Image: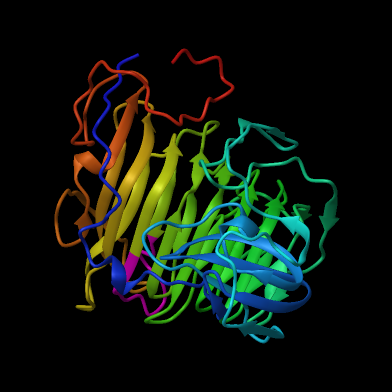
Amino acid sequence: MNVRRIALAALALGLSAGAWAANRPAGYVTICSENKTCTVASNTNVAFGRADNFVYKTLSGSFVCNEATFGSRIAGGVNECSVPSGTSSSSSSSGGGSSSSAGSSSSSSTSSSSSSSGGASANVTLQAWPGCPAYAAPSGTVPLTASIVVPAGTTYDGGGQRFQLTDGGQSEGQPPVFLLEEGASLRNVVIGDKAADGVHCNGNCSVYNTWWEDIGEDAATAKGGPGTTMRVDCGGAFLGTDKTFQHNGQGTLHITRFVADNWKTKGGKFYRSCGDCTGNKGPRTVIIENSRIHNHQTIVGVNSSYSNGSPRDTATLRNVLLLRWNGEIEVCSTYKGVEKGSGSSSNLGSEWNTATCNLSPSDITAIDKTGGSKKTGIDPGNGPDPAPVNRIQENWTY
């Protein structure tokens, strides 16, 4: 098999990272800064980190906001401890820089390394991105008869259980398994083969350590208005047919440390900015970093123009690993967005280093299954597989 190892871009992004990086997850409030002592109510989810990178731990009582408590820290600046908005907490100005937590930890959603485990409804290797929680077979399954609505400013922690709603096909108009209102957070969830329309986000929201063993209509849909951000960090999605992430609203969809593999269908789009929504308009922004995307026909589909003159979309990709299964993949495919009922959204071709497609071949590590460079802009080569690589259980020789 032909392989090209392309130098990975350093993740000190030269673009305006500061414009969208945050020191707390969406829907969280900071309670103290690094090395200070915080106090929280019993069994409170606490985030520790900075610049859109966080580790989470369930704590009770007083603890020191530091690496010793959480097991790791995000380099490059002062980390913060934050809790879901509305959570009871307090802090003090003193704290030992190396002391351990004084609070009791009932569970931790961090992992220093990735591991593999077969899912009940997905015949793939579920290998998390390094530094993310490893996939674990769910301890139980929760059958649902309606969507779970996560109210504004609250967090829903699924405890690693599998959730099933209805269907698993591509029929339009299915309800989501989870509906996140403004400022809501979802974490530690597994969505099974009755995946309906996955997760809907109605504004600012965060999705952490969520696994789709089998994608239904779509894995997740960003529906927030201008200026909102849907953040997806850690987890993975498998067995998609059409789209993994759909962007129907405006604002930003920011995806980090995610793994995806459509190993069964070898097709579909990882991200699509809606081509023909009602009232369809931009700008929409998608940011994908430190992620592994295999067996997708298109990585991102964005509207470089709209029939109504709305501002163009922007896609930024950094440190993305992908498997090119037949030499036909488009990394950043551009379209003309249209109003629903006004015709089809036409494909305008793939782009690199443009105002719409903010990426270059150095941002992508491509693994060739059969060789060739049609539509990719990346020539095949002969080098070692980049790590990490998701090993697909199809008897393929790498």
Q: Residue at x 64, y 61 (%)?
A: 99
Query: Does the magenta-highlighted stretch encompass residue 279?
Result: yes
Residue extending farthest left = 354
Report the magenta stretch's main SS.
Answer: loop
Please state if 354 lies on the left or on the right of 231 as rendered. Answer: left
Residue 178 location in percent, x, y? 67, 67
- Rendered position, 164 above or below 123: below
Q: Which residues are magenta?
A: 273-285
Q: Quadrant of the N terminus?
A: top left
The quadrant where residue 95 appears: bottom right
The quarter of the displayed image where residue 157 is located: bottom right
Q: In front: 191, or 269? A: 191
Report if residue 338 is visible in the image.
Answer: no
Report whether residue 352 is seen.
Answer: yes
Residue 5 colored in magenta in the image: no
| Residue drawn at 76 percent across, 40 percent down | 137
